[in-house]
Amino acid sequence: MTEIPLLLVGVALVANIGESEVQDSVNRWLRLGLVQRFGEDDEVPVFAIYPLQRTFLIEPARLGGAAAQDAHRATATFLRECFEKGRQSELRLPLVAGLLACLHHATEARDPECRRWATVELAWRLIGCAEYVVAEALVKPVMQDDRHPDLLNILARVRLGTSDWKSARELYQEVLIGREACRDRSGEGSVWHNLATIDSNERVYDKAREKFAKSLSIRQALGDRVGEASTRNSLAAIDVEEGKYEKAREKLGEVLAMYQALGNRAGEGSVRHNLATIDLYEGKYEGARENYGRALEAKHAVGDRAGEASVWHGLASVDVSEGNYKDAREELGKALEIFRAIRDRAAEASTWHQLGLIDLHEGKSEQARQNYGKALGIGQAIGDPAREASAWHGLGSVALNEKKYDEAREKYKKSLSISQSIGDRACEAASFYQIGVMAWELAQREVGIRLIALGLAIQTAIGAGEVQVKLTGLVSMAQDMGLDPAGFEELTKEVVKGYRGDRGAALLKTAFEGL
């Protein structure tokens, strides 16, 4: 029934011949020219029927009905056993080809359990290459009759990878019920990790930490070192997003050591990426390039297309910070091509945002407005408040460059409102800074310098890069206002104290009333 070569034990199962008799039968078939043998003298041989004879022998009149279904079932069972026992290499077939054959025979045999197994194995390999659309197309037909947690888990992972977080959350919650029902603790740990990832993507960090803690507890209890490292890496990534860079570096150092001890290249690449992001935020561009470079090598080695695209995006961010806009555009082009191909909407939005930033720096206001608009549309569509806040900030900067102060004010207000609600301190600081610049330009020098000082104080607190350059400009402003170093220091303390009380509301009210 099968076109692929089989080991002798497989021939015995499919042909329903005893293992003690199968060698004699195969030798007879070889003499008759019905089958061909593959393999050198020192290799385990495999056997296959010649294509023409196969077509003749499997005609329904000769092999049909229950006999054909039994042969399909035996073939699927044998192929599955080869994979589960690590013998698939003996078949001399590419891994995916063997799984596709198993899926075909399981489907023909109407064997739901084996069909599900082959589908899940294939789908995870597709997801590993970020082929989310193909993976979904593979599992959906099977799910018409089977909502097993393994299949639901695949679909949930697809939705997570394509930034459909609402659907992913619903599916993972259904998967969790199934895992708990069958007491699959490893599966429970994985689901809690993925639910936490959704919370983290939505910038609900308190809930994300709670769920990561549940995942970590389960994985540690099971001795799952790879899973534990993955969860620790994700917890460190939250620290990065919250501007807790020193704390994140310490955690990432521990995780990196775990992955290196395990020989896990994919995990090491993820940690390198997070370390590079900290370097970028702290203005340590040489370190960022080195870590991004190592991350890219690791991601490429394991075939992680989504990871490669993220690294290209990171490298572009370094080039933007250093003013290498041509190189940055090329790197963002590589990233955007992959993100759009795999339908990672969140990452696509970030890429449009970076392209808008380059346009802004190059004075291409209309193009910047279009690219920030694309980022805003995607951020709103997928419910990503952080990307929405960043896009509003970018659009505000475009308006500010064009001296459209009313428009800039409204967009910065939207950005600041969102960033404060989700705890995005970097975006919050940037908005305070830019609103202060706008107030200064409109001769509101007192409130302008205070807002700029507040923005820089927040950036200093989170360890952001390039603060020193901006601080030099702020000191110059203070001198223009007749403030000596002591007076400037006192002003900064007042601003920070006021922020702790009202998060900058009084300063914003004064600024906006005068704009």
Image (cartoon, grey):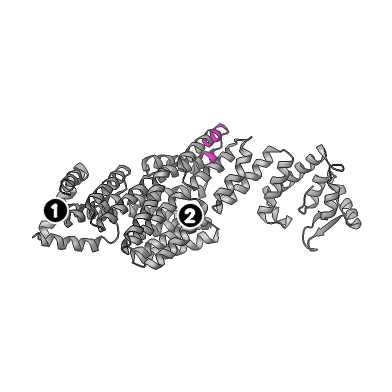
Q: Position of residue 147 (x, y in %)?
A: 59, 35
Q: Main secondary structure of the magenta part?
A: helix
Left or right: residue 490 versus residue 415 is left
Q: Is residue 223 visible?
A: no
Q: CA distance from mark 1 to mark 2?
A: 43 Å
Q: Amino acid at mark 2?
A: Phe
Q: Amino acid at mark 1?
A: Gln
Q: Is residue 38 visible?
A: yes
Which secondary structure lies at badge 2?
A: helix
Q: Position of residue 368 (x, y in %)?
A: 35, 58
**Mark 2 or mark 1, which is nearer the start of the sequence?**
2
Instruction: Decide: is 369 above or below 472.
Output: above
Left or right: residue 194 versus residue 326 is right
Residue with the mark numbered 2: 339
Instruction: Check residue 92 in the rendering and tell me which mark sits there, or answer none.
Output: none
In this view, the residue in front, 226 or 353, is 353
Left or right: residue 18 versus residue 460 is right
Span shown in magenta? 175-188
* Mark 2 residue crowding within 10 angstroms, few (<14) / some (14–19) / many (20+): many
Q: Residue at x 51, y 50 (%)?
A: 226
Is 97 a magenta residue? Answer: no
